[in-house]
Image (cartoon, rainbow, N blue to C red):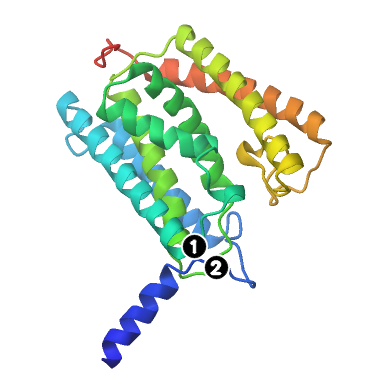
Amino acid sequence: MGLFNSIKEAFLYFFRGKEDLVFSPLAAFSALHLIILFAFIVLVAIIYRGDLGLKEGNNRRKLSHILAVMLLIDQVILYTWQFTSGFFNVELSLPLYHCRIAISLLIIGVLFNRKNILYIGMYWGFLGSIIALLVPDMYYFQFPHYTNIQFFYNHIIMGLLIINLLKSRAIQITSKETKFVLVVTNIYNLLLFIFNLSMAHFMGFEEINYGYMNAFPKIVPIRFGVFVHFLIVTALFNMIMLLIGYLFQALSKGESEIKDR
């Protein structure tokens, strides 16, 4: 019973639902952070080069499905933890951040061959993956905790899936796809900005900041008025989406293997 209780306590602590009052965030570009980034770069290089038999198109398709299923399992565990631990809250837990939506879009796009959905997921997911890995904005749980691992697992798998999709020639990115994603992104950002303001003003959720449409994350010590901030973020999003589009066009070649539906 002593061993069982110890295991139970360790399990409950690892999946605890109340953030810690004392929290030491992972320092950007610390030794541990650099090791994680290095591991990610190595995995990207392996997938990009087509090592381990990935030059075969069928193997790349299989890898895309495996990575998509890994993301799906991760999402099931994440929201199961949020609801069962009591952590779920309106200000932080809704799937409205671009990277969170991108995960769902990538899962649907890969597993159900939805091409336009996949485009949005790839652009948003690439941006979210890179920013999250470079500037980790994690929940306030001191290690060891489930979210300490889930944060990096999530964004690394998403980044690897996007690289594999580009190199597997599953889609072919042109300026048409970039324009489509730009339109969707601007519409979504405007709606998200209005949602944040409405929830803060009418519902009292003053800390709500989905998509960082109202302010930069706390780790970035720069603040503007809310409307000026939105205009700045909108301009940044458009520039970054265009840059990602140029990068994707350079990486994706060949005929599309995913049919429109």
Relative vertical location of residue 140 with respect to residue 59 in this rendering, above or below: below
Quadrant of the rendered image containing residue 163? top left
Tag nearer the camera, 1 or 2? 1
Q: Quadrant of the C terminus?
A: top left
Question: Badge 2 is on which residue?
Answer: 18
Tell me if I can see residue 103 in this picture: yes
Question: In this image, 34 relative to 117: left or right?
Answer: right
Question: Badge 1 is on which residue?
Answer: 86
Residue under the point 44% across and 44% down: 155
Question: In this image, 166 relative to 206: left or right?
Answer: left
In the rendered image, residue 117, in percent from the top left (x then y), is placed at 39, 22
In the rendered image, residue 118, in percent from the top left (x then y), is placed at 38, 23
Residue under the point 27% across and 85% down: 4
What amino acid is labelled 2 in the image?
Lys
**Disc 2: CA contacts within 10 A as few (<14), some (14-19) or many (>=20):** few
In the rendered image, residue 161, in percent from the top left (x then y), is placed at 34, 35
Residue under the point 38% across and 55% down: 80
Quick check: marks 1 and 2 in contact, CB under 8 Å? Answer: yes
